[in-house]
Amino acid sequence: MSARLIVVSNRIPSEATPSGGLVVALHEALREKGGIWIGAHPETGPEEPALIDMGGTQYDKLAFRLTEEDRAAYYLGFANSVLWPIAHHRTDLVEINRSFDEGYLRVNRRIAEQMAEVISPEDHIWIHDYHFFPLAEELRRLGVTNRIGFFLHIPFPNITDLDVLPDPPAFARWLAHYDLVGLQTRADVARCLEMFRADPRAEMLPNGAIKFGAQEVSVRSFPIGISAESFARAAQDCAPPPAHELFGDAYVIGVDRLDYSKGLPQRFRAFERYLETYDTGPRASLVQIAPPSRESVRAYQEITADLQQIAGQVNGRFGEVHWAPIRFLHRPVPREEIAGLLRGARAALVTPLADGMNLVAKEYVAAQDPDDPGVLVLSRFAGAAEDMTEALLVNPHDVDETATAIRRALTMPLKERRARHAACMEVVHATDTGAWARSFLDQLAACTPALRITGRAAEWLRGEEGREFDPGAHRSISKEEV
Ligand code: GDG
């Protein structure tokens, strides 16, 4: 019998057939292998003794309940006011608060305890993202010896930024308790290995894995993608009316969760510079879709106010009675509508200051008509830029460079547009979500986890239990030794 799959992610899709690349890939993998999808319950409430059944059909969906206090400390606090800014090079935005790290560890420990009640020894466990770094360590503490993989969707932090964590040495130890750590790019892997190399507790093994005390972990890149075909279909089915009826000669588009990592003020300023510098070129508008996210975190409130102010300023300066240069939609737009708007845009501005991958870059490419495609202007700091080298790559901090790229995109000859689009499309196909999930899970299955010491012996090793245990047991035993 093949191993069941246990997926853990902060959000579980509520619909029976989910949409959106990542959730679709995980949904398909779970349908194929059977198993459980574990995530946070959408509503906070009093602490529950066990995971809550959310009523899945083809596989089980189970939720852990967060109290209001947990949500403030674990989700808004440590995950989004400490780990997120650290990973996105914004240590100036980190909020240090003892209750955040206590809450983060408390919630991870509770999830581990509740998970341990529902997993079987042969299950493969796949944990997603920065909400759960310590989860494998907590599971191991409870004697869970299963293969456990972890995928980080956001950039791997710079090694010096990790020192901002309240307990910096814990970070490498958390990761070492996984069998496989998946990251978005080769550059992320390099940063992660740099961290382990600098750590006296870690030993780099000839097979590329890292030995860390009794643990052994492999670190590899698995660039995430989208479900290209279905996105292209949605874009075709929902193409918007010709641009001139809506926006002037042409429009360029941005689609981002409203987040300070996405470089939106710099993008608006670059578009202003385009209007200032190239007013003889095509008259273009910027359509920016930016649904709110994490609004209770202060840094997110500030960025929203900044953007509204810049958009107002640019529109006041360049707008006309029947035309506004920036259309800023600060609300969610249905997926099909986004697909159609992406297809109709002559260029996309995907200009984050830091981004794990950025799926919008791939969605824009997939949405284009290959015979008459638009041009992707892409930040060098998006994970997507590592492979999509035929996009117009820019430094998003440099508003002149981005303004020039907008001009170049809007005036690019058809032949060059087609060639660049075809090259980007190859990357989109190569990283299709189905292939991404399969390749991670195959690698995880191929890991030969060390035989782990569990139960009382493990407690003894940690110095938490009786003294009488045999000290000779204090080593990891690889499968080959058995
Ligand atoms: C994290 C990492 C990594 C946006 N607005 C609306 C909407 N969207 C959709 C986009 C896209 C998705 O949300 C955003 O994905 P990104 O990859 O751009 O960014 P994050 O949300 O920050 O995701 C990132 C990703 O995880 C996957 O690993 O690439 O680096 O930060 O699909 O189209 N969708 C709808 N309405 C909107 O208003 N329906």
Image (cartoon, helix red, strand yellow):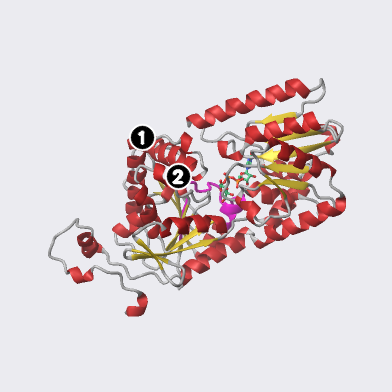
In this view, the residue in front, 381 or 199, is 199
Is residue 254 highlighted in magenta? no
Q: Which residue is mark 1?
A: 97
Tell me the crowding category of disc 1: few under 14, some 14 to 19, or many 20 or more residues within 10 angstroms, Cα based: some
Q: Quadrant of residue 292?
A: top right
Q: Are marks 2 and 1 in contact (CB under 8 Å)?
A: no
The x, y position of residue 407, in whole percent, is 80, 39
Residue 296 visible in image: no
Q: Which residue is mark 2?
A: 161
Q: Nearer the viewer, mark 2 or mark 1?
A: 2
In this view, the residue in front, 51 or 276, is 276
Q: Quadrant of residue 425?
A: bottom right
> What's the amino acid at mark 1?
Asn
Q: Quadrant of ligand 1?
A: top right
The x, y position of residue 473, in whole percent, is 22, 70
Mark 2 vs mark 1, CA separation in Å = 17 Å
Magenta residues? 6-25
Q: Residue furthest left?
A: 468
Residue 173 located left or right of residue 408: left
Q: Is residue 139 above or below residue 209?
A: above
Residue 276 visible in image: yes
Is residue 20 highlighted in magenta? yes
What residue is drawn where x is 34% and y is 52%?
114
The x, y position of residue 55, in whole percent, is 47, 51
